Structures are given as C-alpha cells and as structure tokens.
Amino acid sequence: MRPISLAVTAALLGLTGASSSSTLGLLKANGVALGDWEAAYEKASAFVAGLTTDQKLALITGSSVCSSNGSFSALEFLDGDMGLQNYFYVSAFSLSSALAMTWDHDAIYAQAKAVGSEFYNKGIQVVAGPTSQPMGRSPWGGRNVEGFGPDPYLNGLATGLSTKGYVDAGAIPGGKHFLLYEQETNRTSSGGGGGPGGGGGGGMPPGGMGFGGSNSSSPGPQPSGSFIRRDTVSSDTEPAPYSSNADDKTLHETYLWPFYDAVKNGLGAVMCAMTKVNGTYSCENSDLLMKTLKTELGFLGLVWPDINGQNSAEGPALGGEDYGSSSVWRNSIVDLLYGAISPSGRLVHTIAKNESDYNVELCYTAQCDFTEGVYIDYRYFDAKNVTPRYPFGHGISYTTFKYSDLAIKTPFAITKAPQGNLTVGGNSDLWDIVGTVSARITNSGMLAGAEIPQLYLGFPDAADQPVRQLRGFDRVELRAEQETIVTFNLRRRDISYWDVAAQQCLVASGKYKVYVGASSRDLRLNGTFSLRKSISLAGAPFKDLPARSYLF
C-alpha cells in the first residue's frame, strides 16, 4: 500500500507534462531495476492516467482525489524521529544523537519501528525522518543533536536501520535534510538561526501540509495549486539562504553515504533542504535530485520540500521535486548511578580539548564552501594528529574488556569497478560481502556489561582517504569472564572510494590497514590485508572466492 501511494505521487510530474522529471521514466531510461516497486508503479501509472490535469495538480499539492478509477487520500507529513509532534497520548522517544550513542543495532531499529507504529495508528502516513543531516560538520551547527553524528558509516547504518523500522511498521520514512544541510545560521532570508517555521525540520509541502510554526500535521485537504512562493535575494548583504558548496568526492564519501543505506532499506520519501547546494536551491537542483538521488541511488519515492524549501513552481517541478509543499526513565538513571547496570553508550562525535581545535566554523556569507572535504570530526583530528579530550566512539563502563585473536579474511583479488546492475540503493555489487574481520572480546572485569567493538579501515594511498574510517561495530553483552567472537562483514562499498573522473565507486589495489578497538583512538588490535585487481572473479559471491586468511 505504501509503495503505491509513493509511486502515484512520484510519477505525477511526468504525466502532467514535465516528462523529464518523471521518476519512473528516468529510472527505466537509465536501466535501474525497480524490484519490489515494479507492481506499485504499474498500478500507480494506471491510476494517474485516468486523472484530469486539475486532479493531478491537486494531488501533488496536498489534496485528496476521487476519480472514476479510484481515489487517493492526501498524504500527511509530521515530525519525527522522537515520536509524533504536538499529539496527546503518544510516546516520547530518544533524540537521534542519543540513540546513536547506544551503538546498538537492535535499539536503533526497535525505536524506529515503535515510532512508525504510532504514526501508523494515528493515520499519519509520512514520518519526517530519519534525520541523517545535519551530521555535525561544525559543533556550532545548531541542530546536531537531531542527527546520527558526523561519521558516514555510523550515520548510514543508523539511518538505514531507522528506515527499515519505519517501513516494517507500515509508515513511510522521509529522510532529511537532503543535502549538505549543516547549520541553522542564515538558512533562510529572514535572518537568524530558525527563520520562519520555528525549529524547522518538520517540512511543509506546497498547499500548506503542516502548520508552519509548529511543524504539525495537515489540517485537512488543501486547494490545488496553492504553492508556497518566495522571492529570495542572496548576496553578501543578504547572505541567506546560504549555499553549501562541496566537491564531488566530499559529497559522495561523506554526506551522500547515509542516503545509500536509507534507499537500500526502502526509503519512501526525501525532504529537500531549504538551503542551496553548489549554488542552486536543493529543491530545484536537478543534478542533486534527478542525477544523484533518483538515478545513481535508484531512489523510487517522492521528494518534498522543507519549510520554505520551495521558492517557485516551475523550478522544483523540473528539478526533481515531486510533492509540494520523564518519570519513565527514572529507574534507568538510578540503576546506572548506583551500579546496578553498567553504562555502554559511545560518543558519535569528537569532543575537543579546545574550541580552536575544531576545523570548521560557522559560515556567515552567501557561499559556504566545504573546503575541508571529507575531513570533519575525528577524520580531521586524526589527519592533523590533534589529541581530543574524548575521541569519537569513546564511552565508559564499570567493567573492562580484553581484545584478542584478530582474524581477517578477504579475497586475493577483486574487480576495480562494480560489475552489477543499477538497482534500488545503487549498483548491486556495492552490497556484496567481500571479506570479514573477527576478534575475540572478553569481559575481564568483575561486573556484567556491554562493549561496543569498532572496526576501522585505512586505505591504500591511491584512494586518497582519511587515516582511518569506521567500517563496522557491534554491541555485545557479556557477564564477568564471558567471551565471544565478533565478526564484521566488509561489503564492497566499505572498501571503495569515490573516483571523481570515473564517476563511480572503485576499489584501490594495495595494502589496507585494519584496526579493532573501543574508540577511534583506543585501537587494541591491528593488521593488514592486500588486494590486487582481477577480472575473472567478477560477479562471484564472497563464499565462492579463493580467500586469504590473516591471523594475529
């Protein structure tokens, strides 16, 4: 039911005259396999074909439609990740940043499924979440607590798990904010951090879906064609909304990474940000929406604007936009304070010793250049050998853990470029498992506790990557003196880098460094593996490849 709803909306622009913006036509023209969405798109296309032009316009601007071949109820959008906003008798859930600090796959998924269930039961179809961005490029961003942190791998995994949780609950996940939305300052032309729409983030499709000041749900069907329109001047004297300017490598390897996970796990909607990307409004940026999101990632859902994110009708329509505009936790704290249970959370960002240690400050001009590239948070601290007060991935515990028996298994060789087909979530080969890393974790203390072993990889020099990057983590609960083997699967994507000239993810040949530890700086085990290029192994599953094992 949900894919059909999304397919109806995402296909509408192409059927009302802007055929170059038809998601269905675009994907098929580029050979993207629709998978489970195929039947939904066929049914949606048949429904839309029977609508008049006025009915099509009404539908994509927030109104319900009845026709001779069926009816379609207007979608309702509402914040968000922490539960239904501005509703009585609903649950309050953890902030995304706090949830990410659990480093717990099951907890992240479980919260999203619980949130999605409450949305479904209240009749709100679209969750304005998961919130991947702001990631936390700068500690002064203003809303970093709403996201999953600045590490692309951790952020991506949490975004993907949350997406799956919403989908499994019957709700439509609406990932945000797309893309490079990293600060509140000068985000709108009204000045200040918030701008119109208060805290922002709830999103308001054209036609008034949602209350601008409260980010609440739709008050009901809206007149067709009532788009939000706002003239905006960007200059050094009127700098907002700012433009986030990032090179292709930075965009793909850092900020786009989490959306791969989201699309792969069934992301049904994407909220385009109210700011600009490389000089063009996000919601009418065809390179961003049509080329990158809908073609490269194979995104099949709908794109809708954040509050004040749509500045005209024609630009977004042609550019790729589809749809307009605590007593409960007392016992847990007490148990932690008195030692009944051991804390196990981990930081999803770096805490510096000095404010001057951070490399990215707020931008106060119309053009905000991401000149730091992929070097944000711990990747910058590592590159410049700056010692943090508390590193990325750091946490405390009332017990201790021992790491041992590092084992690495990888193929002798691998193709430089993926050989698979474009599908939902990008090239299918990117998700193939091409290696494993395992380690023995032992609770060497006197108390039961949970440990978060973390896997980091260092790439060959030819890949031009940070010193090391997170590529896996797990949460294991162990009694005193209990031990377990933790295994991390390495996907082709995890050992790939974005080649700007080739415009695809490639694998570099050479030596890879492997680190397993308790944080980005507390690395207990290390080893290496080497890869060479091969053509004959293309398409073979990992289990069938000749493999080299390394034991340390």
Image (cartoon, rainbow, N blue to C red):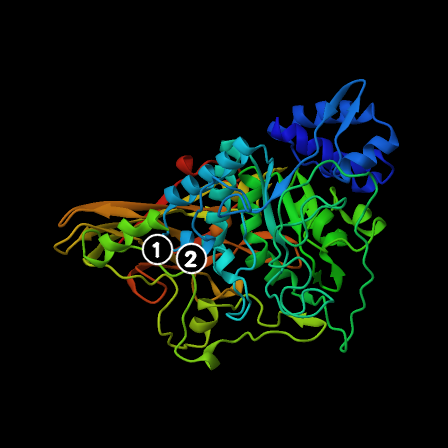
Please determine whether, in this image, residue 56 is positioned above or below residue 444.
above
Quadrant including the C terminus:
bottom left
Q: Are marks 2 and 1 in contact (CB under 8 Å)?
A: yes
Q: Nearer the viewer, residue 71 or 428?
A: 71
Mark closest to the chain's N terminus, 2 or 1: 1
Please, what is the three-letter code of the amino acid marked with disc 1?
A: Gln
The quadrant in which the N terminus is found is top right
- Tell me if residue 428 can be seen: yes
Whether 243 is drawn above or below 336: the answer is below
Observer able to see residue 342:
no
Q: Residue reaching furthest top?
A: 68
Question: Taking 13 as reference, is 365 left or right?
Answer: left
Q: CA distance from mark 2 to mark 1?
A: 7 Å
Q: Residues within 10 Å of mark 2 (few under 14, many from 20)?
A: many
Which residue in the protein does label 2 denote? 470
Disc 2 marks a residue whose amino acid type is Leu
Graded by Cα atoms within 10 Å as few (under 14), some (14 to 19) or many (20 or more), the crowding at tag 1 reads: many
Q: Position of residue 469 (x, y in %)?
A: 44, 60
Residue that badge 1 annotates: 454
Q: Position of residue 509 (x, y in %)?
A: 49, 56
